[in-house]
Amino acid sequence: MASVNSPFRRFIKPILFKLLGKRLYKHFQYLGKLKDIKQRLVEEPEIELLPYFIHEQDEVLDIGANYAYYTERMANLCKKGKVYAFEPIPFTAEVAQKIIRKLKLENVVFYQKGVSNKTETIQFSVPKLDFGAISAGQAHISTRNNELVKDSDLHISDNYETFDCEVVDIDTFLLPALKNLTFVKIDIEGAEYFALQGMRQTLLQFKPIILIEIVPIFLKSFNVFVQEFQDYIEKELGYIIFEYDKPKQKLLQITGKPVEKEKNHILIHTEKVKHFSHLIA
């Protein structure tokens, strides 16, 4: 998940946290994230593809909603449909829900839950910044082996705060209510394989476009090898894997090649590829 990390914010955040405490700091975090959304300051390259994939009456999922960056954009594209947003971490979920209410995104159904391959309560770890606040975008299931991440550019802290959160599988929790699922965004710090396992029937029924972050070292830290993950996507679910070339504004097929670098990918079911031929290089 992209974020704004300006010199001013790096300077002011520790001061606000120490002076105001966690409760009031949360309010300033809300104001900052609201500004980011309104001024389009948090823009991953793939976000410009959303109008091609999401239409007015669609249903979409935001798995790992964080501070509602994607939730807001998707909600404004499917005004007569629904966004089902999932975010398990209490601090982040409270800020996201406040943003959703402020922006009057009435077509968003928000769940303070994570998504996995079964319904249960599990522990999440959230890295703490040097001054004590959490780094919400790095929240992950606590069983992740962070020893494998320590020597990578993705490691940010050895100090964690933990939370017990409910996770659900989409097939059980949401599939019976779905009628027109067309798009899924998943960014959950290495647990993407488990989320896809828990929504297998949903994906086979609706064949939605999927925007998913793939980070090989995070997968490995859950004892999942990237080739195993790709095989599941391609062979079990029937999807083709693409990455987005922003300068060319085209999707580049990488099916058959190993994913080596952490980045977002677009998954399109083989039966839907012909509908997006104009986007594919």
Image (tube, rainbow, N blue to C red):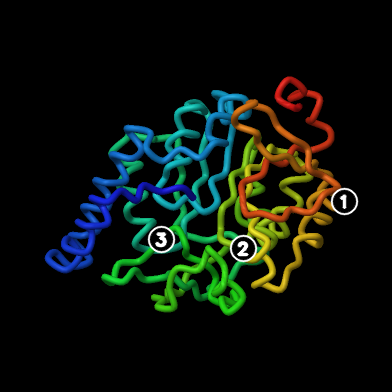
Drawn side of residue 70 relative to residue 24, left or right: right
Residue 191 in the image: state x and y as whole percent. 62, 63
Kindly identify which residue carries mark 1: 235
User: Which residue is at a point 54% across and 74% down the rendered structure image?
Assistant: 150
Residue 267 placement (x, y as % from top left) = 72, 41
* Marks 3/1: CA–CA distance: 33 Å
Q: What's the mark number on residue 258?
A: none
Q: Residues within 10 Å of mark 3 (few under 14, many from 20)?
A: some
Per the image, label 3 sits on a secondary structure element best described as helix
Between 53 and 145, which is closer to the camera in this rendering? 145
Percent position of residue 67, x then y: 39, 49
The answer to whether residue 52 is left or right of residue 26 is right
- Where residue 78 sits: x, y (%)? 52, 28
Q: Are marks 3 and 1 in contact (CB under 8 Å)?
A: no
Residue type beneath disc 3: Ala
In this image, 216 relative to 103: left or right? Answer: right
Looking at the image, residue 229 lies above or below residue 43: below
The residue carrying mark 2 is 190
Tell which of 218 and 80 is nearer to you. Answer: 218
Residue 136, label in figure? 3
**Amino acid type, mark 1:** Lys
Mark 2 vs mark 1: which is more N-terminal?
Answer: 2
* Name of the residue lying farthest toward the left: 19
- Badge 1 crowding class, 10 Å Cα cut-off, few under 14, some 14 to 19, many 20 or more, is few
For marks 2 and 3, give the CA distance: 15 Å
N-term mark: 2 or 3: 3
Give the structural element (helix, strand or loop) at label 1: helix
Which badge, 3 or 1, is on the more N-terminal residue? Answer: 3
The three-letter amino acid code for the residue at tag 2 is Gly
Residue situated in front as seen by the camera: 186 or 102: 186
Q: Report the residue at 30% width, 41% height from top.
A: 34
Do the residues bearing badges 2 and 3 touch, measured as CB atoms within 8 Å? Answer: no
